[in-house]
Image (cartoon, helix red, strand yellow):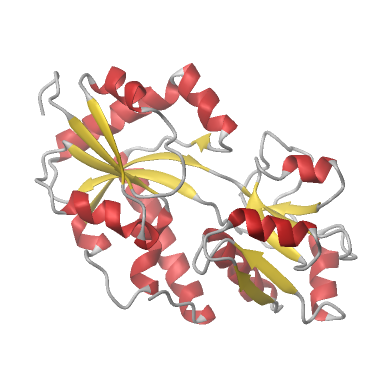
Amino acid sequence: MKDALSVLTLAVASALPVAARAEDFSRTFGGPFVVESRPGANGNIGVDLVVKAPPDGHMLFVAPPGPFAINAHLMSFMPFNPATDVAPVAMLGIAPLLLVVHPSVPAKDLRELLAWLRGEGAHAHYASQAVASTGHLAMELLKSLAGVDATHVPYKGSAAQATTDLLAGRVAMSFVNTSTTLQHLRDGRLRAIAVAELKRVDSAPEIPTLAESGLPGFEATPWLGLGARSGTPRDIVHRLNDRASRALAHVEVARRMRNLGIEARPMTPEQFAEFVRAENGKWADIIRRSGAKVE
């Protein structure tokens, strides 16, 4: 890969907005950067485009956890093998989740919520954006660790409809994105129980984490990662990682990411690969226990 790059292509394998615009990548990567929106199949379509390209670092993808660490445990058919066909390049950022309840739920913290679920709330329903979304799997992880139960109500990719029904009290609780929920908390239309991160979030430092509330080590966070086809030379992977880190450090990029509820979380390629392996093992176990499947 030359210092003055030819055209780079970034396949966006997610319906989420890209954390940084093409010009931000063009500036730090030293050449034109074309962004192609390729969502679908829980991110597999965009990633499949990249793993079929030459392993020269000129075609990359940005994707949520699905193609990296979740889909292979959910789907009967995968067009690629994440373990052998994908090279993790860089973590771009995380989008912290909050566990929230409708005000009709008589619980102000995790201890009270778990007690309610073991008692009068034993038949409660919880919302998620879709089967195998991070919100769905986060609740399944909570159920497994805490020994409680609740009925899943997936909304087929519609976070807006899930939020509407939560605000109306048609479902009792949900894991939701921090940035889209803080106003509802301030208005008293929802109540925060805890953050699904290992540390409190800067935008709402008063809300405790699930780990400090009684579930040590609990972490269930949507994230965005940059990947390439496996076989891409290591020196190219490291140079791409370095340039991605520079893009994330840009003030305007950081501002736009914060507006989207995404916190930058730079890692080396080795750290990111280890993170992906850990996510893979964690979600494989939870998916097996929950019986979740996507065809």
| Quadrant hosting residue 216 | bottom right
Residue at the location (46% across, 39% down)?
17
Residue 249 in the image: above or below residue 233: above
**Residue 235 picture location, percent across and down:** 16, 34
Looking at the image, can residue 214 be seen? Answer: no
In the image, is 200 to the left or to the right of 10?
A: right
Residue at the location (29% across, 33% down)?
241
From the image, which quarter does the C terminus lie in?
bottom left
Residue at the location (66% across, 60% down)?
162
**Residue 14 picture location, percent across and down:** 40, 49
Residue at the location (72% across, 57% down)?
164
Looking at the image, can residue 182 be seen? Answer: yes
Residue 270 in the image: above or below residue 159: above
Observer-nearest of 178 and 43: 43
In the image, is 20 to the left or to the right of 222?
A: left
**Residue 26 picture location, percent across and down:** 28, 22
In the image, is 293 to the left or to the right of 97?
A: left
From the image, which quarter does the N terminus lie in?
top left
Residue 94 in the image: above or below residue 71: above
**Residue 7 picture location, percent across and down:** 16, 28
- The tally of labels here is 0
Observer-nearest of 268 and 191: 191
In the image, is 286 to the left or to the right of 102?
A: left
